């Protein structure tokens, strides 16, 4: 496993500057910030890691790039590939939402929908990459991808003037791991890593002492549906700065509705998972604690924002 560190996040920030957006921060109450990464190109943070992986590879093969995804990573890879003028082939599982499939089509990606869950689509993508020689852009367990996602952490610290805690959702763990590295410094904040109860990849890994398979289900499965935490993420997220908490599907649905009704933030279920930890009470900030919550994805049908 290739190690990744804070210096790699700094290098990624320089490498992808001008290719990704510096997404805004909204202070919704004193000391409580929403990092609106759902406003990023392709509707999620994933484009940061996709660009960093592709640009750092140098000359890309004629066969282009290939990725497996629940949807958001595929959209990011397709967006980056289109921006860089190369072919993108994306494998998605059957649980991928029609909104995300339509987005992939609009970006000109070559789509294969196969397998019931992400891991089955990833297996098919791996076989295809071996056949074609395309550059694989992993959804979360690749050093360049983790470093790219970590640029979100750099922005959070700069835009807020520093926080005590960053609350972030976990699927395969690459985003939370990147943010952990990106916020490393003299006053490193605590990382509250939030997962749906029905997809506890980090929680199970910490309990077992290593990444282990988990069942996948629930409202956020199309974006947080990794069956096992990435090895890089485990190395980083098993440190003392990280607290793992679980939220119910009901809490995620309620948080998504609140983000829309109170703040007009149109998040997908996975995008609302981190915020769900606060109203659900599984994470309670202390008096005067400065907290940044990452709202990480917006690829959803807006007609469902007030429903389940």
Image: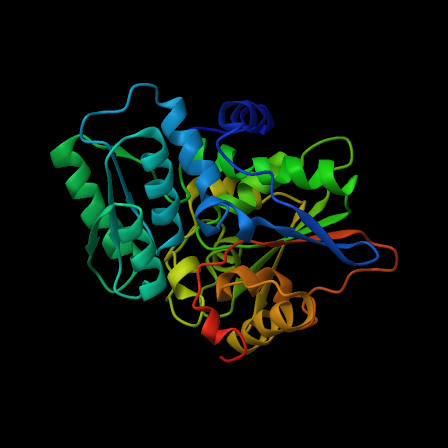
Q: Is residue 261 above or below residue 27?
A: below
Query: Residue farthest to the front?
Result: 106
Q: Nearer the viewer, residue 242 or 132?
A: 132
Q: Residue at x 77, y 47 (%)?
A: 164
- Quadrant where the image shows the N terminus: top left
- The residue at 44%/41% (across/down) is 47
Residue 117 can be seen, yes or no: yes
Check the image and name the residue furthest to the top: 59
Q: Quadrant of residue 86?
A: top left
Q: Is residue 64 left or right of residue 12?
A: left
Q: Looking at the image, which residue is at 42% across and 33% down?
A: 51
Question: Which color scheme did the rendering employ for the protein?
Answer: rainbow
Using the rendered image of the protein, determine whether residue 1 is visible from the camera's viewpoint.
no
Percent from the top left, x then y, of residue 221? Answer: 40, 65
Answer left or right for 264 relative to 118. right
Name the residue nearer the viewer: 92 or 5.
92
Relative to 264, 121 lies left or right: left
**Picture quadrant of residue 31:** bottom right
Where is residue 288, by image quadrant? Answer: bottom right
Q: How many marks?
A: 0
Q: Where's residue 214, x and y in %? A: 39, 62
**Residue 75 x/y as whole percent:** 36, 48
| Left or right of 267 on screen, residue 71 | left
Residue 184 in the image: state x and y as whole percent: 67, 34
Which residue, as the protein is rendered here, is positioned at the far right? 288
- Residue 189 drawn above or below residue 273: above
Residue at 72 percent of width and 35 percent of height: 158
């Amino acid at each position: 496993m290739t190690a990744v560190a804070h210096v790699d996040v700094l290098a990624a920030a320089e490498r992808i500057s001008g290719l990704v957006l510096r997404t805004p921060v909204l202070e919704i109450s004193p000391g409580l910030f929403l990092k609106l990464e759902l406003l990023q190109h392709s509707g999620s943070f994933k484009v940061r890691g996709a660009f960093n992986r592709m640009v750092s590879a140098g000359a890309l093969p004629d066969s282009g790039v290939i990725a497996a995804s629940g949807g958001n990573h595929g959209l990011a890879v397709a967006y980056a590939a289109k921006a860089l003028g190369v072919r993108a082939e994306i494998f998605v599982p059957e649980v991928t939402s029609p909104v995300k499939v339509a987005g992939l089509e609009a970006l000109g990606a070559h789509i294969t929908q196969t397998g019931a869950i992400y891991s089955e689509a990833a297996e098919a993508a791996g076989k295809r990459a071996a056949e074609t020689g395309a550059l694989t852009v992993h959804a979360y367990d690749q050093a360049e991808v983790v470093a790219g996602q970590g640029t979100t952490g750099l922005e959070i610290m700069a835009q807020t003037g520093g926080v005590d805690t960053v609350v972030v959702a976990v699927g395969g763990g690459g985003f939370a791991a990147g943010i952990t590295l990106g916020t490393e410094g003299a006053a490193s904040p605590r990382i509250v890593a939030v997962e749906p109860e029905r997809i506890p990849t980090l929680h199970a890994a910490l309990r077992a002492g290593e990444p282990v398979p988990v069942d996948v289900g629930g409202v956020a499965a199309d974006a947080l549906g990794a069956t096992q935490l990435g090895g890089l993420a485990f190395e980083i997220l098993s440190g003392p700065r990280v607290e793992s908490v679980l939220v119910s599907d009901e809490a995620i649905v309620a948080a998504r509705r609140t983000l829309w009704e109170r703040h007009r933030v149109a998040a997908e279920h996975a995008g609302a998972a981190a915020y769900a930890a606060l109203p659900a009470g599984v994470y309670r900030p202390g008096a005067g604690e400065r907290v940044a919550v990452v709202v990480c994805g917006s690829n959803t049908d807006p007609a469902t924002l007030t429903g389940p």
